[in-house]
Image (spheres, grey):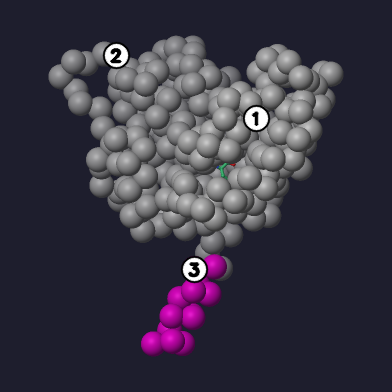
């Protein structure tokens, strides 16, 4: 894809963004709510429009083109809804498609990536674990992070198979989930790790279960607060930071491509946000076939 002809600030004015517009936050599912929590704490005057692509989660099981297609289409949808900036609150989507999304979308973008740098800075044993999706771990962006920041620190990279699915069904502490986590974390402890990078935005919702297994032997690295601060800097650079308005109660607008019931449940129980979730259809090139196949299936069944 060719480079965008306008500079970032010209591109923002080209879409006439204004500071009162919402920030769009998107994830494959509910994980981005951990980023939303940090954004609300750090930037309380911002209104937020959140999209969970739960119908197609987990992205970690999808091919690269599918993830790029969804990231771009949802980014465009958020812009049509008036978003002034976009947070790709998904390590997998960032790893796979942030460069392409930056080229294609004329609003400021903030992505997320595993906290390899802070982990390498703070590990004393020089052994750290990373839990992330397979797609994130095998991505060139992640390999580049390791090459740049791992230095003399050994990173034990563990795909968190089935963890996203557990959070998507609001399971943050069942016996099965704990057994799964134990299988991932105990080898890290045995290898002398003192630090654990949570390289997927779903995983901070598993903090309590992780703590029950590792006690205080691992320092958990979650980059959501750093992402919220980065968003604040980016909004300032573009003159897009919302002005404080005492009269305004800023409740997020929650949207989901799925039925939204688990999103509503997780937001209420872990974020203490009581808000309805709108079902939204965001068709894209790669899901057009899936939808028509599903429609054919339904027609055959009926
Ligand atoms: N929250 C996403 C991430 O940070 C989960 C990816 C997935 O759906 O597999 O990577």
Left or right of 216 in this view: 14: left
In percent of the image, x 53 and y 19: which residue is there? 226
Q: Nearer the viewer, residue 153 or 85?
A: 153
In percent of the image, x 41 and y 57: which residue is there? 258
Compared to 21, does 287 lie above or below? below
Label 3, on which residue? 291
Classify the position of the C terminus by image quarter: bottom left
Label 2, on which residue? 243
Left or right of 252 in this view: 231: right
Main secondary structure found in the magenta portion: helix
Classify the position of the N terminus by image quarter: top right
Displayed-image quarter of ligand 1: top right
Label 1, on which residue? 196
Left or right of 64 in this view: 9: left
Q: CA distance from mark 3 to mark 2?
A: 41 Å
| Helix, strand or loop under label 3 | helix
């Amino acid at each position: 894809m060719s480079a965008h002809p306008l500079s970032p600030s010209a591109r923002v004015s080209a879409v006439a963004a204004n500071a009162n517009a919402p920030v769009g936050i998107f994830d494959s599912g509910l994980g981005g709510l951990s980023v939303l929590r940090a954004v609300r704490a750090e930037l309380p005057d911002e209104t937020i429009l959140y999209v969970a692509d739960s119908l197609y989660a987990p992205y970690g099981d999808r091919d690269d083109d599918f993830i790029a297609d969804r990231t771009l289409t949802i980014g465009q949808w958020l812009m049509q809804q008036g978003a002034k900036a976009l947070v790709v609150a998904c390590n997998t989507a960032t790893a796979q498609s942030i460069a392409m999304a930056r080229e294609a979308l004329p609003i400021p973008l903030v992505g997320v990536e595993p906290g390899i740098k802070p982990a390498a800075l703070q590990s004393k044993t020089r052994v750290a674990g990373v839990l992330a999706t397979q797609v994130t771990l095998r991505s060139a962006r992640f390999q580049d992070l390791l090459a740049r920041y791992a230095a003399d620190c050994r990173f034990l990279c563990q795909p968190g198979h089935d963890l996203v699915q557990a959070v998507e069904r609001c399971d943050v502490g069942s016996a099965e989930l704990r057994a799964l986590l134990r299988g991932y974390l105990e080898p890290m402890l045995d290898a002398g790790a003192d630090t654990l990078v949570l390289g997927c935005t779903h995983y901070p919702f598993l903090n309590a279960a992780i703590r029950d297994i590792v006690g205080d032997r691992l320092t958990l690295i979650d980059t959501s607060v750093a992402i919220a601060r980065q968003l604040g800097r980016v909004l300032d650079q573009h003159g897009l930071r919302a002005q404080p308005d005492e009269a305004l109660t800023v409740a997020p607008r929650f949207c989901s491509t799925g039925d939204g019931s688990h999103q509503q449940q997780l937001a209420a129980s872990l974020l203490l946000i009581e808000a309805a979730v709108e079902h939204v259809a965001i068709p894209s090139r790669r899901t057009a076939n899936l939808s028509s196949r599903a429609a054919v299936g339904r027609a055959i069944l009926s």
